[in-house]
Image (tube, coloured by chain):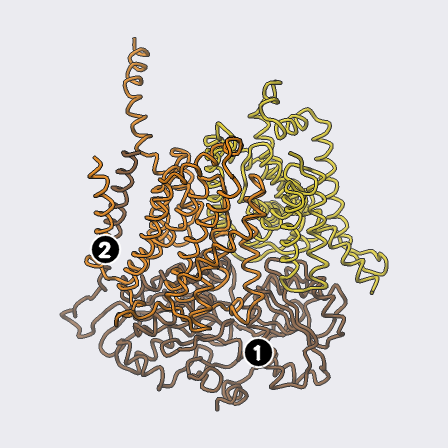
Chain colours: A orange, B brown, C yellow
Amino acid sequence: MTRAKSLAPLAILGLLFLIPAFTQNPYYLYLICNFFIWAVVAVSLVVNIRTGIFNFASAAFMGIGAYTTAILVVKVGVSFWLTLLIGPLVGAVVAVLIGIPMLRLKGMYFVLVTALFCQIFILTIVSLSEQTGGWFGIAGIYAPTLFGIDLSEKVPFYYLVLVFMSLSFIILYRIWNSYLGKIYAHMGENEALAQSVGVPVTLYKVQSFAVASFFTSLAGCFLAASTSYIEPGMFSFFASIKVWLHAVLGGVTSVFGPILGTGVALGLTEWLRGFLLISPIILGVFVIIVIIFLPRGFISLPEKILYLIERIPRLKEFISRRKS
Amino acid sequence: MKRAFFVAISVMVLIGLLLASVSCGSSEPTATAGPTATSVQKTDTFRIGLLACLSGAAVGWGIPWAQSFEVQRDLINDAGGFTVGDTTYTIELLIEDDAYSAEIGVAAVNKLIFQDKVDYIIIGFAGSVLHAVAPILNKNEILGFTGSSAASMPEDSTWIYKTSEHNDYRYVAVGGYINDNYPDIKTAVAMDYDIDAGHYAIKVFTDFVNENTDWEIAETAYCSEGTKEYYTYLNKLLQHDPDLLFLGGTPGAFSLAVKQVRELGYTGPIFGANGLDTSILIDIVGVEDAYEIYVPYYDPNVSPEVKELCDEYIARYGEYSVLTPFMSDYIPVIIQAAQQAGTLEKHAVKNALDTGTFTSTMGEGMWVGQNTIGINHVFLRDHIIGCFQDGDQVAVGTVAMKDLARMLGEL
Amino acid sequence: MDQAYFVQLLINAVMLGLIYTLTALGFTLIFGISRVVNFAHGEIYMVGAFVAYSLVSYGHLPVVLALLLAAVVVGVLGVVLEFLIFRPIRPKQVGTIDELPNVIVSVALIYIIPTAVVLIAGTRERTLPHLITGSVTLGGAIISNERLLIMAVALAIFVGLLLFIWRHRDGRAMVAISQDTEAALLQGVSHQRIISLSFGLGFGLAAIAGALLAPIYFIDVNMGPPVLLKTVIVVILGGIGSIPGTLLGGLLVGFIDVFGQAYLGGSLPTLVAFALVILIMLIRPRGLLGHD
C-alpha cells in the first residue's frame, strides 16, 4: 500500500510529462497549462481555508505576480527567471503587510475586505498607468530561451509550467501533511482553543496567508506568460470567485479536491463552448446540482457512494417491511 | 485518507486521459462534394471563425454582432454562395464566445486555428482579446479581422485587418463636420467611462482637436465604471461654459448623459462617439431634448445590400441594430479578395488584400492606415454623419472616402 | 462655492445613499438570518429593474404599481430559490466549512441569472417611463420631482422595515435569530419560516432598489456587479446586521460617490471609499455600528 502510494504520484507526473507525446495541439496545451495554473491557485486557497482564512483576494495576488513579471520583463528588461522569484516574493510581502492588520477581522468582514482588496488592486494598477499601461494592459510577455530552446513555444512552455506548477503543488502538499499543516487545521477548526493552548495564532495565520499568496503570485506570473498579454480586468474580484468555485466544487477537505474541481470546471466551461449563449446556465445548474448532492465536493464522491451502498440493506429491509 | 488519495489520483488520470483523448479527436473535415457528372462546377464550404462577446461585460454588443453575421451568412448562402475560380462556396461560421476576456479569447482563437483549422478569423470588439490574440495570428499566419473600433491596433498588425470603422477616422469625419458648421466653437469638454475604450476614445478625440481645430479642451471627465449618475461630472464640465460636448459610452449611457446634460441647461451641440439606434436615444432622452446630437450614422438605407441585410435582421430579431451596417463589409471584402486572388489560400488572399481594390457595401472602399498606424490595414468607406432632430436620426452630411483619406494624410 | 451646485450634489448623494441602503439591508438581512453571503445580490437588483420594465411594457401597469409589484415578484423568487437550492445545503453547524456550499450556490446564480435575462429580454438597454414630471427649485438648484419621490419612497420603505423589525413578532424573531440562533430556537421561534421571510425581504429590497432607479436611469444586464461592490462596502462600513449602521454606511458611500466624483473625478472616489473601509476596519473591526 505504501509503495503504491509513493508510486502513484510519480506515475501521474510521468503521464503528464507524456501528454505532448499524445498531442501537440497548442489549443489543448494552452488549456492544460491554464488548468495547472488555476489548480495551484485553488490549492493555495484551500491551504488558507484549512487555516480558517476565507481569502477572496486570490485574483489580486495573481495580478501582483502577473504584473511584476510583465513590468519587469517587458518594460525594464529583467530576466524572466528572476521575475519568477521577485513576483512571488512581492506577493508574499504584500500578504504579510496587509495580513497583519486584516487577519484580525472575523468571518464575513475578512471575506468582504479581501474581496475589496481585488478592486483596490485593479484601481491602483489603473492609476499607475505609466508603468502598468493602465486599462490598455501590457502585451508581449513571453518566456525566455533556455539552452537554445524557445520556452515560449507551446510544448517547451507546457513543460515549464508543468515543472513549476508540480513543484508548487508538491511543496503545498508537503506543508499540508506536515506538522505545520496540522497546526493550521487545528486553528481552522477552533481558533480559540488553539490560542488557549499557546499556539501563536496570528503568526501562523499570517504565515499561511503569505505562503498561499506566494504560490498564487507564482501562478500569476505563468498566467501572464501563458496569455502573453494582461490587463487589469483579468484580476477582478470575479476571478477570485472563480477560484472559490473550483475549490469548493472539488472539496476543501483534501489537497486534491481543488485540482479536481479546477479540472472539471475549466473542462466543462471549454466543452460547453458549443452551446454559446446558454453555456453559463448549464454550468451554473451543474454546479448547483453537484453541490446539493455533494456539499463537500467531488472529493467526497467515494464516501457518498459507500454511504449509499451501506444503506442498501436498510433500504431493502424498509421495502420488505412495507410489503408485509 | 488513503482511499481518498487513490480516488483523487485515478480521477486526475481520468481527467488527463480525457483531455488527451479529446485532443486526439480530429475536427470535422470540410465538406468537399466532388464534381457532379453534369457540371464541372465544384462546391465547397468556406469556414470563417467569429469571436463575439456572448457573455461578460460586452454582451450587449456581442450578441447583435454575432446575429448580424448569421443573417449575412444566410443571405449569401441562400443566394447560392459565392464563386472563386471554378468552385462555388457556401459560408460556414464558427462562432466562439470570447467572454470579453483575453484568457478565454486566446483559448477560442487556439481552438479555431488548431482544432477547427480555419484560416480566417473575425475577432470581436474586445481590445484585450485583440491584443492577446494578435501574436498568435501573426505567428501562424492566420488572417484576422478585428471588430474593435475603440482600441488601438496591435504593434504588429501584419495579419490583422480592420474592416469596419475606426474611431480614429470617424471622429475626423464627425468632428470635421461640426467644425465646419459651428465656426463659433471655442471650448470643448469630453466625458467617457473610466475603462480602456473610454480612455482610447478621449485620446483620439483630443488628437483630433489638436490637429484639426482651434478648439480648446477645457476639461475631460472619466466616470467610474457602472455609474449612472452623471450630474456631478456634467456639472463640473458645464462650469467651463463649453460650446461642444463630446460623449462616449454605450447607447444607453450616452443617451442618459444627454438627458441629464439637457436637464442641467446645456443647449449646445453634442458629439457622440459611437453610432446608435434611434429608438434607444429617443426612449431615454425624449423627443424634445434630442437635438443637435451628431454621431457616426449607420444608415440602413445607404445601399441595397445594407438595406437587405438590415431588413432581414429586423424581420428576424424585431429590432434594428447599428451593428448590422457596421459589420457589413467583413465577409464581402474577404470574398472580393479571394476572387481577385482566384483562390481561398490565405497567403494569396492576404496578397490580394494588400494590393487589390475593393468596394464597400456602402459604395467605394480602400485600405488606409500607413500614416496613422504604419500599415494599410484599415478599411475606409464613406462616412455618414447623423443628427438627431424631431425624434429621428437623419443624415446631415457625408464625408466621401477620398476626402477623409486626404484629411488623414493618407492620400 | 456655488450653492445651487452644492444642493444638487447633496440631493443626489442622499438619493444614492438611500438606494445603497436598501440593497445593503437586503444583503445583511439574508446573511444575518441564514448566513448566506449572497454574491448574486447585484443580479437580483438587476432582475428587479427588468421585472418592473416587463410589468410596465407588457403588463401596461402604472409605473408606481409596477415597482412595488416587482419587489413582490422578486421576493417570491427569493423564497422559491431558498426552498429549492439554499435549504438542501443549509449547514448543520455555523462557522465551519459546511457553510461554503452557500457561497458557491450564490456564485452559480451569477452565471445563471444574467444569461437568463439576456435570453428572455435581449441585450438592448431600456428605460421606464417617468414616475412624475415637473421639478422644484431648492436653494437655487433645480431638482426633479421624480428624484424627490424616489427618495421619499426609499425612506418610507426603510422606515417600514424598521417598524416591522422592531414591532412585528416576525421582525423581532429575525433580530433574535441573527443575534443568537440557538437561544431563539429554544424560545420556540420557527427558524424555517424566518429564513424564508429573510430571503423574501432581502430579494425584495434589492429588487425595489433596482426598480426605483430605472425611471431616471436606464437598465441593462450588466448593472449588477458594480452594485454588488457598493453593497459590500456599505455592509462592512455599517457593520453586518446593524440596521442604523447600514443606513449610515449607505449615506456615507452615497456622499463619497457623489462628492468624490465632483472633486476627484474618475475612479478615485471608489479608491477613497475602499481606503476608508480598510481604515475603519482597522479601528473598528466590526464596522461603525456593528455589534458582536
| Disc 2 secondary structure class | helix
Q: Position of residue C188 (x, y in %)?
A: 60, 18
Q: Is residue C278 left or right of residue B50?
A: right
| Disc 1 secondary structure class | helix
Closer to the camera in the image, C136 or C241: C241
Discs 2/1, front: 2
Question: To which residue does mark 1 refer?
Answer: B171
Q: Position of residue B322 (x, y in %)?
A: 52, 67
Q: Chain of mark 2?
A: A
Question: To which residue does mark 2 refer?
Answer: A17
Q: Which mark is residue A158?
A: none
- Does B287 appear above or below A174? below
Q: Position of residue B165 (x, y in %)?
A: 49, 76
| Total count of labels | 2
- Is residue B87 in view? yes
**Residue at 28% in and 17% down:** A316
Quadrant location, the C terminus of chain C:
top right
Q: Is residue B164 left or right of residue A163?
A: right
- Which residue ends up furthest to the front in the rendered image? A198
- The crowd level at tag 1 (other Cα within 10 Å; few <14, some 14-19, many 20+) is many
